[in-house]
Image (tube, helix red, strand yellow):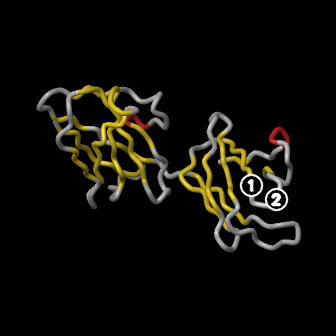
Amino acid sequence: SIIRGIVKDSAGKPLSDIFVSLLSSGGDNGLDYNYGWTGSDGAYEILGVAPDNYRVLFNDDTGVYIPQFNGGVFTRKEASEIAVGTQSTTTVDATMKMGGVIKGTVRDADGAPIADARVGVRNTTDVEWDKWVTSAMGDYTITGLIDGNYFVDFYADNYDEQYYDGVDDPSKATLVPI
């Protein structure tokens, strides 16, 4: 069977190089290992899809657009299963939304940048932290964030963990809105 479609941005412009993967209801942790990328026209086609129920995940490796599932939702739990039969063609299009950005520089008490500091962000509705590492100049840019309020924490070797804006207690952290 085949799953195909077109991926565009909210203005209707085709998006190239979007990674499209199928997550089955069965299989190895729900990943069926079927995937593809969109071309310059935003089109993708995944061949040899076994009959099963799937969710389709669209991911922009550049981080500009928010990863999403079929139906324009952001979590696997929210996505509806798509039934694929034997020798069938199923069309699953997507319109991807640009994500928000949190960026900054991690510095020590004297103002010197801290390289290789870990920066974590967590939406107030999520339980898992996404982690990034600062550049040699202490800079970080976190892209592809869905709308919401975010905890931001910082940790580096030989430094105490801190939350934005300079506190060590997450309940006192200043949330960053997107």
Which of 28 and 178 lies nearest the eye of the viewer?
Answer: 28
Question: Quick check: marks 1 and 2 in contact, CB under 8 Å?
Answer: yes
What amino acid does circle 1 point to? Phe
Residue 132: give x, y in percent of width and height. Answer: 62, 56
Determine the secondary structure under disc 2: loop
Which of 160 and 113 lies nearest the eye of the viewer?
Answer: 160
Residue receiving disc 1: 154
Locate residue 122: give its quadrant: top right
Disc with the residue nearer the chain's start (1 vs 2): 1
Of all residues, the one furthest to the front in this rendering is: 158
Mark 1 and mark 2: Cα distance apart in space = 9 Å
Locate residue 139: give its quadrant: bottom right
Side of 34 relative to 150 (left or right): left
Callout 2: 10 Å neighbours few (<14), some, many (20+)? few
Residue shown at 25%/51% (left/top)? Answer: 43
Quick check: 109 above or below 127? below
Residue 37: give x, y in percent of width and height. Answer: 30, 53
Callout 1: 10 Å neighbours few (<14), some, many (20+)? many
Quick check: 132 above or below 105? above
Which of 156 and 75 lies nearest the eye of the viewer?
Answer: 156
Residue receiving disc 2: 159
